[in-house]
Amino acid sequence: MTRRRIFRVAGLILLGCMVCSPEIFAQILRGRVSDAATNEPLPAATVQIAGTYRGTITNNDGMYEIAVDDLPVDIVVRYIGFRTDTLTAHTLTPLEFRLEPVALEMEQLVVTEDDPAIWIMRQVIERKQIWRKQLNTFEAQAYSRYTFSNDSGIVAIVESAATTWWDQDRRLREEVTGSRSTGNVPLGDGEALPAASIMVNLYDDDVRISGHTLIGVTHPDALDRYVFTLEGMRRVDDVLVYDIAVEPKQNLTSAFVGSVSVIDGDFALIEARLRPGPAFLFPFPIQKYEVTYLQQFSDYDGEIWLPMDLRSNIIVELVSMEPLLSFPPFIIDMVSRFTDYQLNVELADSLFEGSYLQVDSSAVSSGESFQREGAIVPLTPKETVAYASIDSTHSLGEAYGPRGSLWDRAERLAEMEERRSSARGVFSFVTDLGFMPQAWYNRVDALHLGLGYKKGFGEILEVQAQGGFNTGQEGDARYSYQGSIRLDKDWFIDIGYRAENVPTYSSNSKSRLSNSGLMLLGQEDYFDYYRREGISFTGGYRIKRWRSATITGTYLHEKHSGLTGNVSYDLLGKSTLQRPNGAIQEGDLRTFTATLRIGREIPIKIGPSRHFESSIEISMPWSDISFRRYNLKAGGRITTFLQRRLLPATLDYGISVGLSSDGGRTLPPQRTFVVEGGTTVYHWGGSLYTLQGLPYQGNAIVFGHWEHNFRTLFFEILGLEWMTNKGYNVLVFGGHAFVREARPWGNKWIDHNELGVSLSGIFGVMRLDLAYRIGENQFYPAISVARIF
């Protein structure tokens, strides 16, 4: 065979493959749908291949495109309020549909309720409960386009095509087979936005939107939650369609506002035009969050109604302080469509393993998925221009970044700071090596200066060392040093030695640094101090599957000795005489401590603090200091009402119980329990508002605190819309402490009870508190960080 004949045969084979393979040579039919009376485009008109479930929708300009396997083919176009039209495409020449409008009708409807819409929606709800039970699984092709904009125009576009599977027990999974975007969207290999998972179904009982769970208009309880009003009737061909207005009976209900269209006979939704109602609220710094939806439904297998598409518009605006600081609006226009439904098909278990979103990287890279699936909603002219003009130089950070004179000033300061970095080269070099300077001031150490070192080697080894000196002590107590070696993985071992001056109790509200600042401003030293020298051995294990629980055991062998000192210097020249340092029980301390910890307590209560900790410390028989110390701490959150909201009303609580058992002897002062209070101005979470100054110390404590956040409920009830929109919250709180104090003449139980109210959300981040101590007839004002979450 000659070379020419070989090339001729190969060419014929290749041409045959191209003709026979729809994946390589897809036939895309395009066209336009318009109003025959006005020639205006009809957006979201449904375009379907007759006799199949393959279809698409028109874009805002009435344009469509749909993949067809063979020609000729019959195309059916439907639009509510217009007569359905069917045309035959013999070629790929654009096929235009001009739909005839159907006159609005108001026909007599005989029902028993005051408003016919109630009877109609009852039929919709009851029939949905029947046909939903017949739907077990489905497979479909999905497409979504996200168009991101600000106040200047389009800044980015992302498109995704996917195969999606749904199971009534295992919910939805999807595999992205196609993805494309403007050049400034940094989607890496294996990354894509979902095409199906993001699409809400307005026919669902519960519709989840941005953290809220809205009650659907066809929920079994919808007649009790919504006001339905019949607005009018239209016809789709010869079938009557009811247009029904929707609004919640109470503004506090997480529900929709808008309208739905119900087809007569089947009594099913064929269109929904909805937006979240007044209860769709968000915390600081979100000032505005608006969402609107338009969705159409069609029947499959004769009686099962599923979404064909979804068009949504989202506008998010952050709090601005113009002209000092402002942010551009964040706008997302999304169009999605579902096609090629296959109902009640057998789905492999492997489809539901792993993440709900999978990406077929090879299919995405090939770029063939959009043509193979067809039914892509055409781009609008503005989107076409955006695709052609937006490249990697158009930064999303700049498009949505802050503006204003304050931000300009911050950027200039950042540039100046960067230029000064060379002057701090030595300091940066030291910190990069793992060194960190230390400094504090108190009435015992006076001024303490030191240097710490912390460095990791590999994945599990960490070495730590510290050293320093103070100006307030003499001899060995003038110097502090410690070091430890830690092996850390799921299990961990820590071996250390320390010789240092430390507070007799730890604090959730004050650190050594913050206490130093208060002392230098003339305030009383918050702590007492003692010296400890010795070794520690700690081992533990993290149980990650059990809410990140940690079990630890620690053995201590330390020598404890008291310290004296009464430095009273401050920057304001008050020279307030500080109290003498408290005495401790001196001697060798040898103890073993076992601890179970789940979660972690958060002292600054901007969000929930779910935690549990139980510990027991037992002195060894050969220890000079003998005691047993039991401690339990727990905290959590209970949702009380408004449970469908992103931020429901909540009750946060915490409890701390400390007990000792040592044959009648008291705990050493360096091991007593404490209940803390706030400062004269500021309050920390988990402490008593009306206890100011030094904490309670005792051999036993029972301390509980709680706080109920009503969110914006009271302002919504009172109709104070501006306070609701500002995100002001009302909170009621209380604290109750019982402490067994150790005194020379014996132990005595004291109690401390308080109640209070707070206004949270001032300037978005602050709250004002007013507490009343029961039994003292006195109020205590304070400020603290707002409860945002």
Image (cartoon, rainbow, N blue to C red):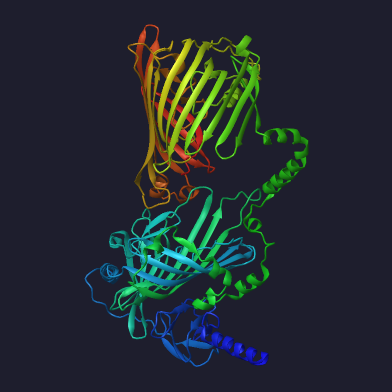
Rendering coords of residue 134 (x, y %): 28, 70
Rendering coords of residue 737 (x, y %): 37, 24
Number of numbered discs overlaid on the protein picture: 0
Q: Is residue 596 left or right of residue 455?
A: left
Locate residue 153: give its quadrant: bottom right
In the rendered image, the vertical position of residue 645 relative to residue 429, given as above or below: below
In the image, 484 versus 50, the foreground residue is: 484
- Tell which residue pokes out farthest to the left in this image: 112
Q: Which part of the image, by quadrant, shows the N terminus?
A: bottom right
In the rendered image, the vertical position of residue 735 relative to residue 645, given as above or below: above
Rendering coords of residue 100 (x, y %): 44, 87
Locate residue 168: give its quadrant: bottom left
Q: Is residue 541 left or right of residue 105?
A: right
- Tell which residue pokes out farthest to the front in this image: 1
Rendering coords of residue 228 (x, y %): 32, 66
In the image, 609 versus 230, the foreground residue is: 609
Locate residue 131: give its quadrant: bottom left
Residue 434 seen in the figure: yes
In the rendered image, the vertical position of residue 760 relative to residue 512, given as above or below: below
> What residue is drawn where x is 64% and y is 15%?
569
In the image, 197 versus 679, the foreground residue is: 197
Residue 653 seen in the figure: no
Q: Is residue 373 left or right of residue 215?
A: right
